[in-house]
Image: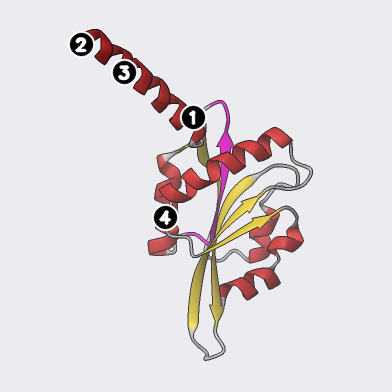
Amino acid sequence: MLRYHLILTKYDQMMMSKANAASGMAVNDDCKLKFLALKAKRTYRFIVFKIEEKQKQVVVEKVGEPTQSYEDFAASLPSDECRYAVYDFDFVTEENCQKSRIFFIAWSPDNSRVRSKMIYASSKDRFKRELDGFQVELQATDPTEMGLDVIRSRAG
């Protein structure tokens, strides 16, 4: 009976290990803290996140001050590497009400490495689960897919 239990335990450990590997990269605590600061205190306009393959985790690459523009945010995304990003978009409705939407952007440029695209795609769901609170999600492969006009139309 004991032997049977040990076999199941080893099998369970193996399956759990595979499940963790399939669930994507770990999310560094700093990512969560910075996102909470953006969401609750509006400390940042945007946050850019990068996967560090050697560390097997998502880390904060850059934060934007509240005074920075959307153009500053777009310029902070590399043209040939994948990133996750969060942008706090302020706008005024047709009824003249001030509103804000938190955008999650999965940036995956066409000319980025295939391996990088696969890692970012497989880690996205775990990342979004751990940083709960996005209101709008965008997948962009070039700047036109996340232009200010697209952001405005999706915010409404």
Q: Which mark is residue 8?
A: 3
Q: Does the magenta portion include 48?
A: yes
Q: Nearer the viewer, residue 96 or 111?
A: 111
Please say if the residues under marks 3 and 4 sit with CB atoms less than 8 Å apart: no
Dot 4: element: loop
Task: Name the kind of residue labelled 3 in the image.
Answer: Leu
* 3D distance between C-alphas at marks 4 and 2: 44 Å
Residue 114 in the image, given as x and y percentages of width and height: 72, 36
* 3D distance between C-alphas at marks 2 and 3: 11 Å
Which residue does the numbered mark 4 point to in the structure image?
Answer: 132
Task: Name the kind of residue labelled 2 in the image.
Answer: Met
Q: Nearer the viewer, residue 3 or 128?
A: 3
Q: Kindly report which numbered mark, 3 or 4, lies closer to the viewer in this rendering.
A: 3
Dot 2: element: loop
Q: Does the magenta portion include 101?
A: no
Q: Earlier in the sequence, mark 3 or mark 1?
A: 3
